[in-house]
Image (tube, rainbow, N blue to C red):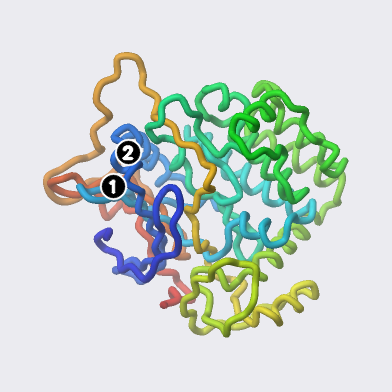
Amino acid sequence: MVPGYHEVRELGAGGSGRVVLATYASTGAYVAIKYLNAAMRDDPWFVARFREEARVMVELRDPNVVRLYEYYEDVLEAAIVMELVDGVALRRILSEHGSTSPEAALVVLKGSLTGLASAHSAGIAHRDYKPENVLVQADGTSKLADFGIAARIREPGTPAGTPPYMAPEQWAGEPAGAAGDVYAATCVFFECLTGRRPYGADHPAALMRLHRTAPIPLEAVPGSVRALVARGMAKDPADRPPTARAFVADLEVAALSAYGPEWEQRGRRHLAELATLLALTFPLARPAPRVSTSVARSMVGRMGGIRRPRLGPRVVAGAAVITVAVTVGLVAANREPDRLAADTIFTPAPRSPGSGDPPAPPGRTSHGRTSPGKDAGSPPPEPVATPGPSRRAVTGRTVPSSASTGRPSAPGSPGPVRP
């Protein structure tokens, strides 16, 4: 258990570990804590790289990226404390509804590219972008989770990522980077538009051949966005947009031309409706009578003082079936924010020639706490969770100092919803 937090219940488990709902003891703010699995925490190269990336991610302030508050490590466990997003993974929406409207797909792509651009500017690539890592909130906005978690496990000779979304250069063994993130985001855009992945195959070798040599199935997507898909999924990284931010500019021009000035509002509204129909799977959902849905499991908690939202006409029927009250202004969170697809491939951390032991943990001390260096500032008013680059060594623990802590503060109004 990470000191300073009270665990409430487990939210889910996946390829990278298990996730629990918790509250920060000092403020009562909700967070999500991910405990990394044994393969990850026992790999010194993964831990060293992730620890260094946590130093950067704790400083990252982008509304499209799940914040990291704290990285904790001792002899038995390693964990990251993250922003709690009270929402649902895009994977669940696609599994339930098949596809989205073109405007909604564009909203997802724009939000993800914006978050990726911020991370890329800080020198961080996601390396495993997929629908499981895009969390959609009740208001239709989304956040990107799990930067770098799935990319470094010791299995020599295998590429990093999830095969249905891996760029051709990743299959060739090149390091996953910004261009690969753009490719993966476009693959997910394709899936939102069509309800299926760009290339269908059961075996990784077949997927490798398709991603590297098969034509992009542009005939399956609306003509208004084919140019976006063609650029984002170009086989040669040099033929893709030079940056995620440049791709956002292309997207906005295409969306405005095809769908008019209100495309983003319509797309966000559609995503909100689809997410609301799955509101029982939100981490902070109110318990309700048993209902029949296609969602395999629902993890629901208590939520007090909630008023019913105003739902659009397309949501009324679904809301009547679900009979769940949600607040449009809820802090966004996901029941299984870390869940990795079963087909995720892990790879070893790259070693530079002549490299020796992995880097030592930052700020190691025998006792007490140390600052990561730069002032992480105070988090936004809502309870979110972001791992700061803190570490507990065998003989002690280091965390950001009180002046630079990234730990969550209690929201101003309303206060955190208690389970």
Indicate the position of residue 57 as horizontal and vertical percent values.
43, 43
Residue occupying the point 42% across, 55% down: 82
The residues tagged by marks 1 and 2 sit, at their Cα atoms, a distance apart of: 12 Å
Direction from residue 204 to residue 27 in the image, left or right: left
Mark 2 neighbour class, 10 Å CA radius: few under 14, some 14 to 19, many 20 or more: many
Q: Is residue 241 visible?
A: no
Q: What amino acid type is highlighted by mark number 2? A: Val
Q: Compare marks 1 and 2 and give the one earlier in the sequence.
A: 2
Pointer 1 and pointer 2: residues touching (CB < 8 Å)? no
Q: Secondary structure at mark 2?
A: helix
Residue 239 lies in quadrant: top right
User: Is 353 rendered above or below residue 225?
Assistant: above
Indicate the position of residue 89 as horizontal and vertical percent values.
58, 57
Please name which of the two marks, 1 or 2, marks the residue nearer to the observer. 2
Q: Is residue 129 visible?
A: yes
Q: What amino acid type is highlighted by mark number 1? A: Ser
Disc on res. 47: 2
Q: Secondary structure at mark 1?
A: loop
Direction from residue 198 to residue 333 in the image, left or right: left
In this orientation, which residue lies closer to the viewer: 158 or 260? 158
Quadrant of image for the N terminus: bottom left
Q: Residue furthest front?
A: 203
User: Is 211 rendered above or below residue 78?
Assistant: above
Residue occupying the point 53% across, 35% down: 120
Residue occupying the point 52% across, 81% down: 287
Direction from residue 69 to residue 194 in the image, left or right: right
Quadrant of image for the C terminus: bottom left
Q: Residue furthest top?
A: 354
Mark 1 neighbour class, 10 Å CA radius: few under 14, some 14 to 19, many 20 or more: many
Per the image, the residue denoted by label 1 is 390
